[in-house]
Every structure is written in structure tokens, then in C-alpha cells.
Amino acid sequence: MTQLTRRTPNRTVRDLQREVDSIFDRFFGRGGDDDTSTVWAPRTDLSETDDAFRIRLDVPGMTKDDIAINLQNNTLTVSGERSSERQKDGEEYVRVERAFGTFHRTFTLPDAVDPDRVEATYDEGVLTINVPKTEKSTRRQIEIQ
């Protein structure tokens, strides 16, 4: 039976992802001549309590100065850049799984938040953004008379 597709056993999904990222980076003018600059998205958890929303982003290897947080028209944008730690002094990498380069995440917030009280903290590679709800939007228990 003749095989119509060429099989490359050493090709992985990660290799394909790297190639697609590289194509987009070149098309949109991101990155430099080397392939160390990629676009990535930090893993994110979003939770809600009675009085606030909490967003946690995993951004290890970064400092708070590497990250920017903007809030405009109920759109919260978190962006930053993680620099590559790769050495160019003859060291050849056998495997690279950690992403470097720029990232940007956008979250649309409901109208029921208080933009003046948004706070952010950074601890051990986790950025936590606390978005309080307005007083009128918080849940309260109604007692039956």
C-alpha cells in the first residue's frame, strides 16, 4: 500500500507549535532574527467571591517591573515580557519547553466592579489581581419577615 503522507517520527506537536508561532511572529513583526522571542500566555485562574473577583496569573521568572496592568472601560489588560535566559557562549540546548517573549491577556469585567479599588500583588511567581465589586452589586441575605 502506498503512503500518501510523509511521516516524520521525531516531529512533535511542540515542534509544530514552535513553527506556527514563528510564522505569526514574522508576519506580525514580533520578535527578532532569532527564534527565542515567542508569544505566550500565562496560565490563569479566575475566581469570584461575594465581594470581589480574583485573577491569578503564573508568571515565574519575572519581576513586577516586567509586568503592566491597565484598566480601561471595564477591560483589564495584563501584559509583559519574560527575557530568555539562554546563553550564547557555545551552549547548545537539547530541549526547550519554557516560553519567553511577550504576553498579553485581556479580561472583560462586568459593570458591577469598582475600578478605583483594584489591587495587584506579586509573590513567588504568581500575580494576583483583586477586583472588588461595588457595594450595590454584592450579594446579601434577605431575612424573611
Image (tube, rainbow, N blue to C red):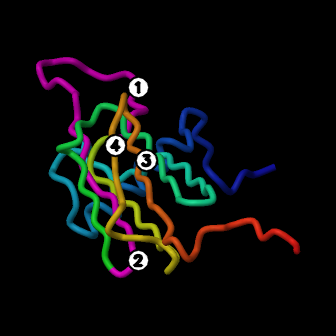
Residue 88 position, x and y percent, is 13, 25
Residue at label 2?
74
SS assignment at label 1: loop
Q: Position of residue 145 (x, y in %)?
A: 88, 74
Mark 3, secondary structure of its residue: loop
Measure how far apart labels 4 and 3 are at the Cα level. 16 Å
What is the CA distance from the residue labelled 3 to the residue labelled 1?
20 Å
Asked whether the viewer can see residue 58, the reply is yes
Residue under the point 43% across and 54% down? 130
Cα gap from disc 1 to disc 2, whole angstroms? 41 Å
Check the image and report above or below for 47 versus 35. Answer: below
- Mark seen at residue 95: 1
Nearest the viewer among 75 and 7 is 75
Q: Residue at x 21, y 18 (%)?
A: 91
For disc 4, the neighbor class at 10 Å (few under 14, some 14 to 19, many from 20) is few
Which residue in the structure is indicated by mark 4? 121
Residue 87 position in % (x across, y down): 17, 23
Q: Which residue is mark 3?
A: 42
Among the 4 quarters of the image, the one containing residue 63: top left
